[in-house]
Image (cartoon, helix red, strand yellow):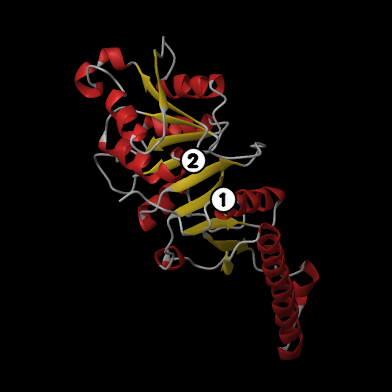
Amino acid sequence: MIPIWKDVAVFLDSTPEGVAIGRHAAALARRHEAHLVGIYGLSHSEVHREETYARGPAALRSVYARMRNADAVKSTAAARAFAQMSDEFGISSEFRLVWRNDQSDDGALKALHCDLIVAAHPRPDDLPHNWSAERLLLVTGTPVLLVPSQWSGATIGTTVLVAWNRSREARRAVNDAMPFITTAERVVILTVDSDRDPARFGSEPGTHLAEHLARHDAHAQIVEVSSEGTTVAAAILAEAAHQNADLLVIGAYSHPRTAEILFGGVTRSLLGETHLPMLISR
């Protein structure tokens, strides 16, 4: 079954990058008529230096009361800002709060039921440290849309570039990205160094995928490039820039020795160098 996004989750915090990622997710939710779940990260208020000298039950109660009040103010402001954004975009939404400096056992992730996760890259500071893109994929099994913190594009998915090698992971990523692919203005199927491994890519790289997408009214252009002494990741990003793509679709490749490591060399290089949003699936 081709996926339809009805629940989109976004991981954000109070930084300008967090606000921007929230607006990108809200725009996607409006475009696909989806419900938006805001996962908002905050740090607990810290003890002021002068408060470390507090002595006695009354003084300590005062310190803890001040911290609780400060946390309440922060969480209320975050909830209000998210509600205002949801009203601005005219979408249904819900707000969930996580504290960065609480011990996290992935319970919040396991309780998350959604079709797509939207997250800033790199991870916002106020989210738990172990909530990397790899961890989000591993725990939830949900495709993750990573948006570079400094990306300033107005839309996501107008021109979609699919990094294609006919693998199981690439097929999964294409299926998970179909809501983007079927609504894009342009779709590009990219193969890199396909002539070096015809058994893997097939005799006509990308042709069968293009035919499949055409049956969904998504007419794709096939592009074959050579890495020419550079890395595969560099070749992918260079072609993405050449095509003015605003979304890269790629599969996450499992490491053969441990399920805890999903990203192979190409994916890790793309994460380190990407200048455009990436949808990653496994």
Q: Is residue 155 above or below residue 34?
A: above
The residue drawn where x is 58% and y is 66% is 93
Tell me how many marks there are: 2
Amino acid type for the residue under numbered disc 1 = Arg
The residue drawn where x is 69% and y is 60% is 85
| Residue matched to label 2 | 183
Q: CA distance from mark 1 to mark 2?
A: 10 Å
Image-based side of 219 in relation to 69, left or right: left
Q: Position of residue 53 (x, y in %)?
A: 76, 75
Helix, strand or loop under label 1: helix
> Does any portion of residue 100 appear in the rendered image?
no
Crowd band around label 1 with a 10 angstrom C-alpha radius: few (<14), some (14–19), many (20+): few
Tell which of 96 and 255 is nearer to you: 96
User: In the rendered structure, which disc, 1 or 2, sits on the residue that comes first in sequence?
Assistant: 1
| Residue matched to label 1 | 31
Q: Position of residue 229 (x, y in %)?
A: 41, 10
Q: Is residue 262 above or below residue 268?
A: below
Q: Position of residue 33 (x, y in %)?
A: 53, 57
Q: Are marks 1 and 2 in contact (CB under 8 Å)?
A: yes
Quadrant placement of the C terminus:
top left
Q: In which quarter of the view is residue 110 placed?
A: bottom left
> Does any portion of residue 17 appear in the rendered image?
yes
Q: Is residue 144 above or below residue 252?
A: below
